[in-house]
Image: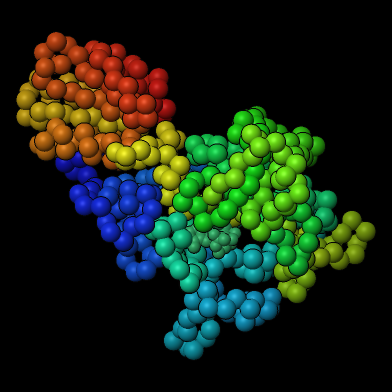
Amino acid sequence: MRSSQFFMPLLKETPKEAEIVSHRLMLRAGMIRQQSAGIYSWLPLGKRVLDKVCNIVREEQNRAGAIEILMPTIQSADLWRESSRYDDYGKEMLRINDRHGRDMLYGPTNEEMITDIFRSYVKSYKELPLNLYHIQWKFRDEVRPRFGVMRGREFLMKDAYSFDLDFEGAKAAYNRMFVSYLRTFDRLGVKAIPMRADTGPIGGDLSHEFIILADTGESEVFCHRDYMDLPVPGADTDFRNDEQIAAIVDAWTAPYAATDEMHDETAWDAIAADDKLAARGIEVGHIFHFGTKYSGPMGATVQGPDGKQVTVSMGSYGIGPSRVVAAIIEASHDENGIIWPASVAPFDLGIVNMKAGDQAVDTVCEDIYAALTKAGRDVLYDDTDNRAGQKFAAMDLIGLPWQVVVGPRGVASGEVEVKNRKDGSRQAMTPEAAINMLLTHAAA
Ligand code: ATP
Ligand code: MG
């Protein structure tokens, strides 16, 4: 992509309304635009990151055996009356009337709808286990929408729902999602720690929030330092092997980790001071087993092996990709701007032409751009006639992992400069060497 043909409205001023760094940087980098309180447009740079996040989430859901569908944003109130949540949900639910006066709503979540789909088609235990997910916009009329897309009213959610014959099956399904989340957040370039979460009236211990540590997080969290270097399960993890998956969950739930609500002072006091991590955190994912809470009242049953009807046991598993984008920035930035993990960067690298219009410089830039683009890299080529200083600042702000700087003096001596955004290191090399290096480092 050539900057001259792209739409990337950078802001010079720091927006006053933005209280936290991710919100400021997303506005300044032209990633999002607020349309109403807690409701945002995603501009090209932001959309590219959001898509990359969703794709990683999708790949890891699929790997764990979940199957993608797409349910609508608008739902009928009647479904929610079946579970009694229409009245219980309160003011967070955006209620709508259609032209026939029917009660509709903008879905804040999809348990009722997925249970309706399930009961309409699945009749036998032989069709289980089943896990269906979608990535769809949700609306919750939050009391205090704030921090940009971190706590929006309209936000994107990946929500998966599992159906099993019994608790044992449901627990195995829960474990698969747990392990899938470890892989997902690792690939997104962040450390998200699974912390025991409140199960409320459902009881049991099958509820975890995945939390990214960041000073601006809304939750107060407590965990053991061991989490910092627990090994993340690899791509060869066998999601059909329940024992292997359960062993990973055991390892990842052994050290102490809890949010404020679940904090146990006695257990905490038993940990050596050096091993304690008391911090603030951002909830980016939540997995939850709720058994027959919806399948019961909504009559989602299957025929069991003995011929009797069994009410299925369910769980739900959420990740908020739009919040994740902001959380990644909270965890990865410096005073000059965003530092994207390579896996979600809007472009793999940028090329800065320090003197657009200078034929020798243009030619070197075009050659590098063509070679890397042809090899499948996403390249942002700043071919505008803005000042060099302005271009450098813009590249640092938008945080692409690598920058290739091409100027007249370097070109005269056959060299360009390659800068690593994260550590700030710069290396001069020939254009060919730069291409080779970026082909190895900037992942396709
Ligand atoms: P919170 O406690 O932050 O309000 P929640 O417990 O209501 O979150 P869930 O219902 O578990 O959230 O939703 C699953 C995921 O959706 C969350 O882990 C989060 O990533 C995302 N999410 C929830 N509410 C919002 C919101 N208002 N804006 C952006 N993302 C959200
Ligand atoms: Mg909430």
Left of 322 or right of it: where is 277? right
Q: Splitting the image into 4 quarters, where does residue 82 fall?
A: bottom right
Indicate the position of residue 137 as horizontal and vertical percent values. 47, 62
In the picture as drawn, the residue positioned furthest to the right comes out as 306
Indicate the position of residue 103 as horizontal and vertical percent values. 53, 84
The residue at 23%/48% (across/down) is 10
Query: Ligand 1 falls in which quarter?
Result: bottom right
The residue at 87%/59% (across/down) is 304
Q: Splitting the image into 4 quarters, where does residue 35 fall?
A: bottom left
**Above or below — where is 54 with respect to 355?**
below
**Can see residue 215?**
yes
Quadrant showing the C terminus: top left
The color scheme shown is rainbow
**Above or below — where is 152 with respect to 78?**
above
Indicate the position of residue 426 as horizontal and vertical percent values. 29, 20
**Can see residue 133?**
no
- Tally of numbered discs: 0
Q: Splitting the image into 4 quarters, where does residue 200 fall?
A: bottom right
